[in-house]
Image (spheres, rainbow, N blue to C red):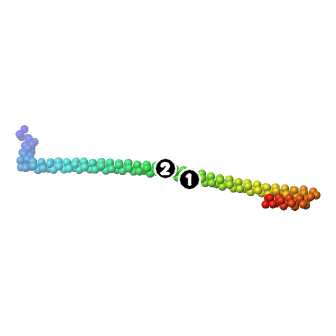
């Protein structure tokens, strides 16, 4: 076993590592390991801070989203109420317009009826006067009665 090359390579390696450690290499290795440990700890702290910042930003955006949804619901509710109010107002105006138009039409009809009735009475009175005049002309007192009756009827009608 002392004559194999592998044995002597292993012995040389152990001696070399011993010399390096004895000569101060262990301090360099430990400093390197400490620096690497510190770098990893710093990276972990930074990652933790970034994660907390991300959670804070996410919570803020969630709050803003909820506020926006609430505001949107308020706007929609207000718009619906306004639309209902405008619809009711338009309906009331339409009903008022129809009522006024109906009343105007009824008034015009009543006036037309009154005018037609007055015209019918005037025509009937004129016809009655003519008929009475014709009848009275045929009788003996026709002239005097016709003249006085016509004057009397005209005075009453006009």
Question: Which residue is disc 2 drawn over?
Answer: 81
**SS type, badge 1:** helix
Q: Quadrant of residue 119?
A: bottom right
In the rendered image, the residue lying farthest to the top is 1
User: Which residue is denoted by mark 1 in the rendering?
Assistant: 90
- Image quarter where the N terminus lies is top left
Instruction: Identify the residue at horizontal 85%, vertical 57% (top origin).
Output: 129
Q: Is residue 82 visible?
A: yes
Query: Residue 155 or 55: which is nearer the viewer?
Result: 155
Measured as percent of width and height from the top left, residue 151 is found at 84, 61
Residue at the spot 46% in from the left edge and 49% down from the top edge: 77
Towards the viewer: 118 or 54? 118
Q: Which mark is residue 123?
A: none
Tag 2, which secondary structure? Answer: helix
Q: Is residue 38 left or right of residue 117?
A: left
Residue at point 41%, 50% (across, down): 71
Locate residue 104: give its quadrant.
bottom right
Please provide percent x and percent y for residue 22. Answer: 6, 47
Q: In what quadrant of the picture does the C terminus appear?
A: bottom right
First of labels 1, 2 by sequence position: 2
Give the alpha-carbon distance from disc 1 to disc 2, as whole Å: 14 Å
């Amino acid at each position: 076993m002392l004559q194999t090359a592998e044995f002597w390579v292993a012995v040389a390696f152990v001696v070399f590592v011993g010399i390096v450690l004895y000569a101060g290499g262990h301090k360099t290795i430990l400093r390197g390991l400490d620096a690497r440990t510190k770098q990893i700890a710093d990276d972990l702290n930074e990652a933790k801070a970034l994660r907390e910042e991300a959670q804070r930003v996410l919570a803020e955006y969630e709050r803003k989203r909820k506020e926006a949804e609430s505001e949107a619901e308020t706007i929609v509710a207000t718009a619906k109420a306004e639309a209902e109010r405008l619809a009711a107002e338009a309906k009331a105006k339409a009903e008022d317009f129809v009522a006024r138009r109906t009343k105007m039409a009824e008034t015009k009809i009543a006036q037309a009826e009154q005018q037609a009735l007055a015209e019918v009475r005037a025509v009937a009175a004129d016809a009655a006067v003519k008929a009475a005049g014709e009848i009275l002309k045929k009788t003996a007192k026709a002239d005097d009665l016709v003249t006085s009756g016509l004057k009397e009827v005209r005075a009453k009608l006009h």
